[in-house]
Amino acid sequence: MENNKGSAGGFARHRREDLIGKTYTYICVLLLIIVITAIVYFVASKGLATFITDGVSPVEFLFGTHWNPVGDNASFGALPFIAGSFIVSLLAALIAGPLSICAALFMTEIVPGKGKRILQPVIELLSGIPSVVYGFIGLTVLVPFISALTGGDSIGYGVAAGALVLSVMILPTITSIAADALASLPRGLREASYALGATRWQTIYRVILPTLAPSLWTGIILGIARAFGEALAVQMVIGNAPFIPKSLLTSASTLTSVITLNMTNTSTGSVQNNVLWSMALMLLFMTFVFIIVVRLLQRRNKL
Amino acid sequence: MQTSTQPRFGTEELSVFYGTHEAVKKINMEFPEKSVTALIGPSGCGKSTFLRSLNRMNDEIASARVTGRIWMDGEDLNDRDTDAVTLRQKIGMVWQRPNPFYKSIYENIAFGPRYHGTRSKKKLDEIVEQSLRRAALWDEVKDRLKESALSLSGGQQQRLCIARALSVSPQILLLDEPASALDPVSTGKVEELVIELKKELRIVIVTHNMQQAARVSDYTAYFYLGNLVEHDDTTRLFSNPANQMTQEYIMGRFG
């Protein structure tokens, strides 16, 4: 029989392999941390330069409604864009949320086998379409349609078009999270409800949805986060006017659309360029907020 | 329309198919009032499937098909015109794994009665207390009714599920291995409860535990490969089984 100490060569080899594996994973993690920290640092330093170097007041940036970045009386009120981002994202979630949850219920509760086989690939396809294609369709189909719907009073570009395009884009995000949550629900809960003489609708409404509320909210928040960060498709249909929208049909802008439109027109280091970085910082900050909310919801989910 | 072949509560030629596989084969069985009937047999013998078909829970499984008749006071429960939702109020069910709703203890019990239209807070309070008392859980939880049902121990959760089933005043209780996921002390409590509850209702219990069947039941039915092999008085079946297969199974020689 082989003695454990006798196979010293094997022991050394095992230790060496462990060491190599460990070092490799450490390097990967370190690289990730460096990249993330560098991005955050870069965005923060650029974004804060607007206020520190260029002397723009943060209050004006956050709450000013006047955006006129060029000239002697330049003003940098970004509120119209902040408001625009929130309005289109929330509207998109308002449209996509109920639709997605119903789609997920259809797949898992109403027609489990067939529903899932047909809907799942469709949803996956939706999530794979590039955002420029969504924007293009919105521009070619949705914008003229909205214009025609209002009898030509509106040009069609605006908040409604932006929110609709975004709602289709976030539909797969919310649906797949909701469908996963529904699938993870213990079977016993449904049976217990049925055995008490509940109908399917009562079971969905009173047992399944309340039990899954935190997960469903997680899906909706992640949908809002995606809508908040989407630039191209929105920019193509929202009209890009620097004002707080007064109705669903008025043209507006979002933080992302202003950045994509203006980044190539400004020179690095100028106040016009720095203020775009401030908006990027704002987007980064909102992403953190969304992640924190999702974390809190998941903690609640554990009960 | 009561004829001599129709049991008060029981089955006539009841079969359950999963696809083309016949999991339960033409079972004729009667469950007498105020008694416990134990269904025993090796895993996969069809006893749980049979139990589930009694309150039409197999309706929820797309591939399952149930033929034959389930009689209850002259009505065929397996008739497609019989509303499964209504009949389930009369036939409660408890499963192997405790499955309380992710709600408070109180809400778990008040849930069923609310479905069926009880709105008055006073009436609901009454039902909650009465159901918990009948399930011998009241003294342990009366001061924490607002707490999550998931904060209870496994044994308490199972008694909560029994209380929940009792909340809609069923006439029959179906128990699918109600104690097999519990520790011995909790198992003892559930068994005491079964013996107590049979004073008021019919109970059908599926169990893998021979001693448990012998302790709690008045009648025992031995299932094998979807067939009802033997159905008799519990004492007689355990002391002097008529069938060789039953004898071997209860002696622990196979299964």
Image: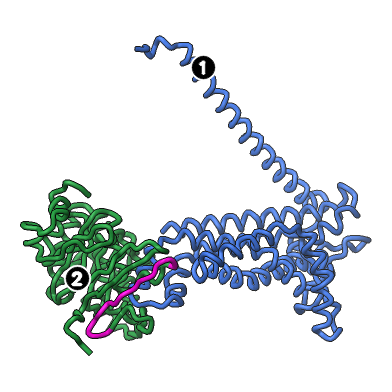
Chain colours: A blue, B green
Query: Residue B217 is drawn in which quadrant?
Result: bottom left
Subunit under mark 1: A
* A2 and B11: which is toward the camera: B11
Badge 1: few (under 14), some or many (20 or more) residues near its Cα, within 10 Å?
A: few
Camera-side mark, 1 or 2: 2
The percent coordinates of residue A292 (x first, y second) are 57, 55
Disc ID at residue A81 = none
Q: Which kind of residue does numbered mark 1 sit on?
A: Arg
The percent coordinates of residue A110 (x first, y second) are 50, 71
Q: CA distance from mark 1 to mark 2?
A: 65 Å
Magenta segment, which residues? B62-75
Q: Which residue is mark 1?
A: A13
Residue at position x 20%, y 71% from top? B29
Q: Which kind of residue does numbered mark 2 sit on?
A: Ile
Query: Residue B164 is drawn in which quadrant?
Result: bottom left
Q: Is A175 on the left or on the right of B182, as rendered?
A: right
* A238 and A129: which is toward the camera: A129
User: From what the image shows, is residue B74 above or below residue A284?
Assistant: below
Is B64 contained in the magenta span? yes
Query: Residue B71 is drawn in which quadrant?
Result: bottom left
Badge 2: few (under 14), some or many (20 or more) residues near its Cα, within 10 Å?
A: many
Q: Is A5 on the left or on the right of A36, as rendered?
A: left
The percent coordinates of residue A9 (x first, y second) are 48, 11
* A121 and B32: which is toward the camera: B32
Tell me, yes or no, if residue B156 can be seen here. no
Q: Residue furthest bottom?
A: B1
Q: Which residue is mark 2?
A: B203
**Secondary element at image label 1:** helix
The number of numbered badges drawn on the structure is 2
* A172 and B51: which is toward the camera: B51
